[in-house]
Image (cartoon, rainbow, N blue to C red):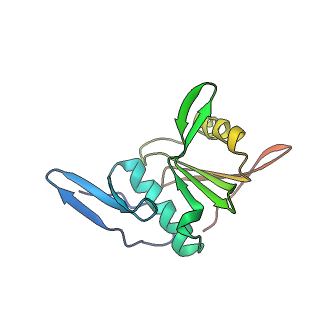
């Protein structure tokens, strides 16, 4: 399986295994093997980034949390918390998915419930970073 090189400062040591014609990646947070999808490849980069580079405890990372939005159940990709308070919401897309205003608005709708201070929207190649305040979102350059 040829995995795309993503736009991250570090190259992480992932555990990947093959079972018949499918590939799986080990998730440190959920302590289980997950089907390797393009979106999961991006999400696992963010998990490794926050844990190994930013020193976040694995228990502060919440993956695929269910969220009720306008009567519909949604799942967020990654939420970084501090003492159970939402700090950073990360929405992951597959590298082939273009990041647009619509994809950012989806993330902002999720954040209208969570109220995280920061949002990262990423397809692994491009990262959009925004800070949330009472004035709305302020877009900032993302730096590793």
Image quarter (top left, top right, bottom left or bottom right) of the N terminus: bottom left
What residue appears at the point 41 percent right and 44 percent down from the top-left corner?
Answer: 96
Residue 14 point in image, percent of width and height: 36, 68
Q: Is residue 7 visible?
A: no
What residue appears at the point 48 percent right and 55 percent down from the top-left corner?
Answer: 124
Which quarter of the figure has residue 70?
top right
Residue 122 point in image, percent of width and height: 54, 51
Above or below 7: residue 113:
above
Image quarter (top left, top right, bottom left or bottom right) of the C terminus: bottom right
What residue appears at the point 55 percent right and 64 percent down from the top-left corner?
Answer: 59
Q: Is residue 127 visible?
A: yes
**What is the residue that sits farthest to the right in this orientation?**
135
**What is the residue that sits farthest to the top in this orientation?**
71
Residue 135 point in image, percent of width and height: 86, 43
**Count of numbered tags:** 0
Which quarter of the figure has residue 12?
bottom left
**What is the residue that sits farthest to the left in this orientation?**
20
Q: Nearer the viewer, residue 48 or 130?
A: 48
2 sits to left or right of 86: left
141 sits to left or right of 59: right
What residue appears at the point 73 percent right and 46 percent down from the top-left corner?
Answer: 115
Q: Nearer the viewer, residue 11 or 71?
A: 71
Residue 40 point in image, percent of width and height: 40, 52
Which quarter of the figure has residue 27?
bottom left
């Amino acid at each position: 399986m040829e995995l795309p090189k993503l736009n991250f400062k570090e190259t992480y040591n992932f555990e990947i295994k093959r079972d018949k014609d499918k590939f799986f990646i080990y998730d440190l947070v959920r302590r289980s093997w997950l089907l390797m999808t393009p979106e999961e490849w991006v999400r696992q980069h963010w998990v490794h980034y926050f844990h190994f580079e930013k020193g976040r405890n694995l228990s502060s990372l919440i993956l695929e949390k269910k969220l009720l939005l306008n009567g519909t159940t949604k799942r967020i990709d990654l939420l970084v918390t501090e003492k159970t308070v939402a700090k950073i919401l990360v929405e992951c897309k597959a590298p082939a998915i273009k990041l647009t205003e619509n994809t950012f608005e989806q993330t902002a709708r999720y954040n209208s419930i969570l109220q995280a201070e920061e949002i990262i929207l990423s397809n692994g190649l491009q990262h959009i970073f925004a800070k949330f305040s009472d004035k709305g979102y302020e877009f900032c350059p993302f730096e590793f």
